[in-house]
Image (tube, rainbow, N blue to C red):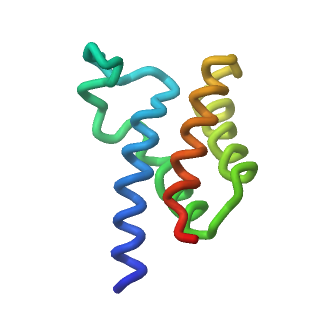
Amino acid sequence: MKRNAEYQRLHKMCRKHWNEFDPIGVSVNLGSDGEPDWFPDDEYDSYVPRTVRLVMEGADAVKIRKYIEHCCTVNMGLGPTRKANEALDRFVDRLLKLQIP
């Protein structure tokens, strides 16, 4: 039961971080702080379970980044840009912080 609770916690956080990363730009209503007020409920949900598994397995930054880059380039058809790479770095850092030492 403890593992299920941990999975649920991580699923919620990984989903939140995917929405904040928002590589295809579907969030709307940026406030004065630059943060989106709304995200589509399920836009990145298909990527969350594998992200959770990587976090739970203690994957390193390279492995996590490789997975996310694959999602962005192959699944979403996005090309690399400097701005995207900076956002990806922040996203990977957030995911690494979710790992239990």
- The image quadrant that residue 76 belongs to is top right
> Above or below — where is 68 with respect to 39?
below
Residue name at image x 70 percent, y 51 percent: 61
Locate residue 20 relative to residue 52 in the image: left or right: left
Q: Residue furthest bottom?
A: 1
Work out which quarter of the rendered image holds the N terminus and state it.
Answer: bottom left
- The image quadrant that residue 27 belongs to is top left
Residue 51 at x, y = what percent? 54, 54
Q: Residue furthest top?
A: 32
Residue name at image x 24 percent, y 26 percent: 37
Residue 69 at x, y = what percent? 67, 37
> Toward the viewer: 60 or 97?
97
Residue 68 at x, y = what percent? 63, 42
Locate residue 96 relative to residue 36 in the image: left or right: right
Residue name at image x 67 percent, y 30 percent: 73
> Above or below — where is 29 with respect to 96?
above
> Above or below — where is 13 with respect to 90?
below
Work out which quarter of the rendered image holds the C terminus and state it.
Answer: bottom right
